Image (tube, rainbow, N blue to C red):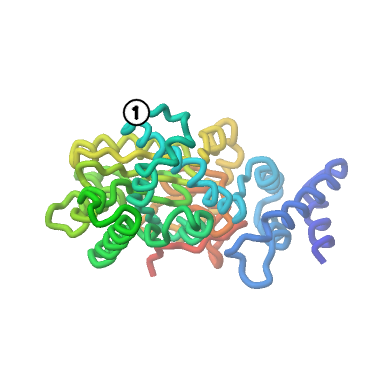
Amino acid sequence: MKDEIVQAFLAEVVDAASFEEHRKYFQNMAAYKYDGYQQYSAGKRFIESFAHWLNKFNEGDRNIALDFIRNRLIYVSNEEINALVASCYQDKIKGIIIERISKELNIPSYYVSKITSTSEFDILLRQSLFCGLSDGARTDIFRRSNSGIISHEQIYQTYELSDTRATKMQEGLEEDLVKKYGKNSPNDRKKFKQLFLLDDFSASGSSYLTISQEGYLKGKIAALYDSIFNDKSEMSSVFDTDDLQVHIILYLCTKQAEENINSVIPEITNKHKNTPKLHILHLINNNTVVVPQKDQKIIDICKKEEYYDKKIEDKHTGEVRLGYKSCSLPLVLEHNTPNNSISILWAYENLKFSGLFPRIPRHRES
């Protein structure tokens, strides 16, 4: 059935010379990646969805849409994201801890074995707390990938820690240090000195850190800092606020989000006298973004009324023809398409025009 469908719709939109090449490409990509999209309804897969999606376009636009999916789409599979999560400690976090111990002990950072064998490295690793910034942080994968290296008591699925939970984490830290180094362990060891905030993807960076129209800091990082550096909060007693390092670890991040977050970090520093550091495992450069001239034909399609339903908008997003915050991404993540991608990719099902990889929204007005 799939062979018949793919041959029927390709025959209408491609010339005979390229027919076989397109057929093999899309069938292989469907089997290798696209069929794994988690928001497809039961029994629905890529080839059928692709045929239905292409048929929504006018004849002149259909070839442009097909060419865009063939040559510009970036699809990140579940396995690829999990590979980034699994390598996060070895590729990024371990080096951060080594660099800090290197400075404290005045040992060159390239003496890796010498540094990692010290009690100082072991203690600082245990004084590190790992929290997810959203459901996409995949803290379960991170935990399993580092079993025996990082205690399960150091990893929490959300950064919104209650005072009770934070206190229990500190108690666990103290118990572990007493077991290893005795009851005479200094008091400053009994607090967390490093906070790693994990997340899977950022397109604009605005949900983490931004400045409101009124001129004050907002976002997840700003709220967390207000909690940690508040003398009246229980959180302030859990962290060594005089010697705390905060690291934001993003598995995937656009250049736009990197620039936006880094541009606001000085405001955090001015307010709290502490500077969070942004680390990216895989950067999505600006050369992948849908831009005028190079991608003018697909931009023109996105702007046509027949391919856009205003019901896709809400009070959080506004117009999203070219994605939320006009990020203009050609990106699909296997678990859900970002609303920062162009709308013809992710428009919700049951609208006048629905996307090839329809998104499940986080926020919708009734």
Q: Please give left or right for residue 90 compared with residue 101 in the image.
A: right
Residue 180 pos. (x, y %)? 35, 55
From this view, report whether residue 40 is shown above or below residue 243.
below
Q: Please give left or right for residue 276 compared with residue 29 in the image.
A: left
Residue 167 pos. (x, y %)? 24, 63
Residue under label 1 = 106
Tell me if I can see residue 50 in this picture: yes
Q: Nearer the viewer, residue 56 or 151?
A: 151
From this view, report whether residue 343 is shown above or below residue 95.
below
Q: Please give left or right for residue 218 compared with residue 326 in the image.
A: left
Q: Quadrant of the N terminus?
A: bottom right
- Residue at 37% in and 55% down: 131
**Residue closest to the far left:** 232
Tell me if I can see residue 133 in this picture: no
Residue 331 pos. (x, y %)? 56, 47
- The amino acid sitting under disc 1 is Asn
Q: Nearer the viewer, residue 360 or 347?
A: 360
